[in-house]
Amino acid sequence: KNQVEQSPQSLIILEGKNCTLQCNYTVSPFSNLRWYKQDTGRGPVSLTIMTFSENTKSNGRYTATLDADTKQSSLHITASQLSDSASYICVVSADGNNRLAFGKGNQVVVIP
Amino acid sequence: GAVVSQHPSWVICKSGTSVKIECRSLDFQATTMFWYRQFPKQSLMLMATSNEGSKATYEQGVEKDKFLINHASLTLSTLTVTSAHPEDSSFYICSARKQGDEQYFGPGTRLTVT
């Protein structure tokens, strides 16, 4: 069973609208949680990184939240743009930065 | 800073041949490099971890004689897929990490074996 589960698997949203992606994890102990954006055919690009003591982190129109007690995180995209179409991957680390647990990603398609 | 490149970005090879993929950290020295494989709509799967100057550590189920990893310098690691078969067709992504820092991912290499 995957240690990082993401939902929804995919979604389509209208340009300009907001959306929220969910990530639940079972990784323990917990070191940090990252959200990445992966465009089709490209490598992942880091959006946010949060440690145990942080419960929110923003990067432009992207805002991530973390509840370490319930082991849940979310990524909120505000005022979506066509360029936001990508897979958003939740990645959890137990030991700092070596071994990472990857979710399968939330596939987001923004339509005009 | 923290840029990682891969070469080539895509490659097509015939079954039975070998292909080499390079991973370079352009603006930092990477003490550790990682190789991942990603199938469509799947998570990145760690194949191996390599430290400069030492043998790579392979994940369970990854054949070390098929996927040869060389980490000859602090800025370069190579992955050679030997005797490639169609089932080796995948997206290969490397990442590089300097001491105490996070992993930085390369842009990936699309391998197609015909």
Image (cartoon, coloured by chain):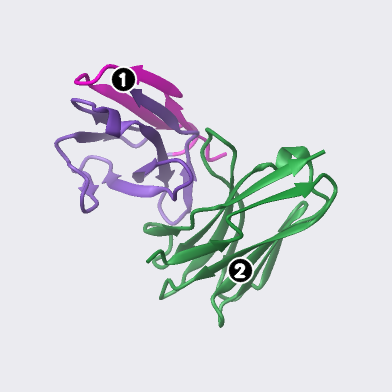
Chain colours: A green, B purple
Q: Residue at x 34, y 27 (%)?
A: B21
Camera sees residue B78: no
Residue A34: x and y in percent read: 55, 59
Chain at numbered mark 1: B
Residue B71: x and y in percent read: 27, 36
Residue B52 bears which disc, if any?
none
User: Quick one: A51 or A17, which is closer to the camera?
Assistant: A17
Please state, as top left, top right, bottom left or bottom right, where the C terminus of chain B lies in the image. top left
Mark 1 vs mark 2: same chain? no
Magenta stretch in the rendered image: B1-28
The residue wearing badge 1 is B114
Given the image, on which type of amino acid does mark 2 rest?
A: Ser
Residue A71 location, quadrant: bottom right
Label 2 CA crowd tier, 10 Å (few <14, some 14–19, many 20+): many
Mark in the foreground, 1 or 2: 1
Asked if the magenta segment contains residue A60, the reply would be: no
Given the image, on which type of amino acid does mark 1 rest?
A: Thr
The residue wearing badge 2 is A73
Residue A3: x and y in percent read: 42, 67
Labelled pair 1, 2 in contact (Cβ < 8 Å): no
Label 1 CA crowd tier, 10 Å (few <14, some 14–19, many 20+): few
Camera sees residue B2: yes
Q: Residue at x 35, y 45 (%)?
A: B34
Residue A30 sits above or below residue B100 on the image: below
Q: CA distance from mark 1 to mark 2?
A: 41 Å
